């Protein structure tokens, strides 16, 4: 079965610094989702990538999917305390648009003011 | 719109007790999901539903039951609570286009089984 591995597991950065979170799949990704979770809250959808080489940005967050569609990265530019939380990548478990997502274990981000 | 709401927010159960976790969405989404999140383990799919009257098992369905009598509600039932079911439970709903699906999550229910 498909597995998603995130790295690093946790990250502490100084406010204003850039950072990157990676998500690696054991199989080809047909849809890769990035979510953000704050402690005690549900997940908030950030972005979804489908095509090899695709890149999307929202405010200071950029997500990319590599050409082979087995790795995605989430890059935050000039981090702020509001970026703190747990970032999870998710992918369709079956390889199609079934909605049956599997998730990576999450990356916990702390941003020091 | 309230989005996806879950009740209760927190519950302590004794081993062997039963309870129902409630989930309601007001976005008229056909698809609904139940996940559990254990520390450092990401989310795992318990059950899902593609519409009223239709449910199917996810990755970790054992010990749980669901029903979907209406589009809005998707309750999750624990019949005989076990310590292994201590977790945070998230309900989600989604809409789909040809190209993508976006899942909207509730705030979660924290369950402790002692």
Image: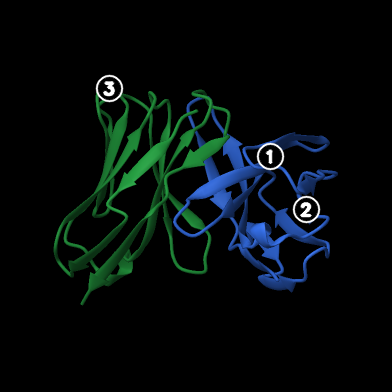
Chain colours: A green, B blue
Tell me the subunit letter for badge 1. Answer: B
A77 relative position to B13: left or right:
left
Q: Is residue A51 above or below residue B79?
A: above
Q: Residues within 10 Å of mark 2 (few under 14, many from 20)?
A: some
Quarter holding residue B87 = bottom right
Residue B32 visible to an observer of this rendering: no
In terms of image quadrants, where is residue A64? Answer: top left
- The chain letter under disc 2 is B
Considering only vertical position in the picture, is B2 above or below A20?
below
Dot 3 falls on a residue whose secondary structure is loop
| Point 75% across, 49% down: residue | B63
Residue at 43% x, 30% y is A31
Classify residue A58 as left or right of residue B12: left
Q: CA distance from mark 2 to mark 3?
A: 39 Å
- For the N terminus of chain B, which image quadrant? bottom right
Residue B103 lies, in percent from the top left, at 55, 44
Residue B48's mark? 1
Residue B23, given in percent of the width and then of the height, sits at 72, 56
Left or right, A88 with respect to B38, comes to left
């Amino acid at each position: 079965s498909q597995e998603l591995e995130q790295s690093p597991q946790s990250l502490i950065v100084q406010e204003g610094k850039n950072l990157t979170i990676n998500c690696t799949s054991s199989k080809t990704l047909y849809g890769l989702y990035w979510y953000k979770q704050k402690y005690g809250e549900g997940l908030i959808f950030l972005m979804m990538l489908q095509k090899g080489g695709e890149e999307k940005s929202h405010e200071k967050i950029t997500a990319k999917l590599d050409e082979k569609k087995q790795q995605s990265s989430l890059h935050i530019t000039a981090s702020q305390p509001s970026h703190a939380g747990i970032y999870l990548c998710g992918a369709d478990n079956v390889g199609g648009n079934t909605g049956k997502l599997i998730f990576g274990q999450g990356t916990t981000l702390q941003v020091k003011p | 719109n309230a989005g996806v709401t879950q009740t209760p927010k927190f519950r302590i159960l004794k081993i062997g007790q039963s309870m129902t976790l409630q989930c309601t969405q007001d976005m008229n989404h056909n698809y609904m999901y139940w996940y559990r999140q254990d520390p450092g383990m990401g989310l795992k799919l318990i059950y899902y539903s593609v519409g009223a009257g239709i449910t199917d098992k996810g990755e970790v369905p054992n010990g749980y039951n669901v029903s979907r009598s209406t589009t809005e509600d998707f309750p999750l039932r624990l019949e005989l609570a076990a310590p292994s079911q201590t977790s945070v439970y998230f309900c989600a709903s989604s809409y789909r286009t040809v190209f993508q699906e976006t899942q909207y999550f509730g705030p979660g229910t924290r369950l402790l089984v002692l």
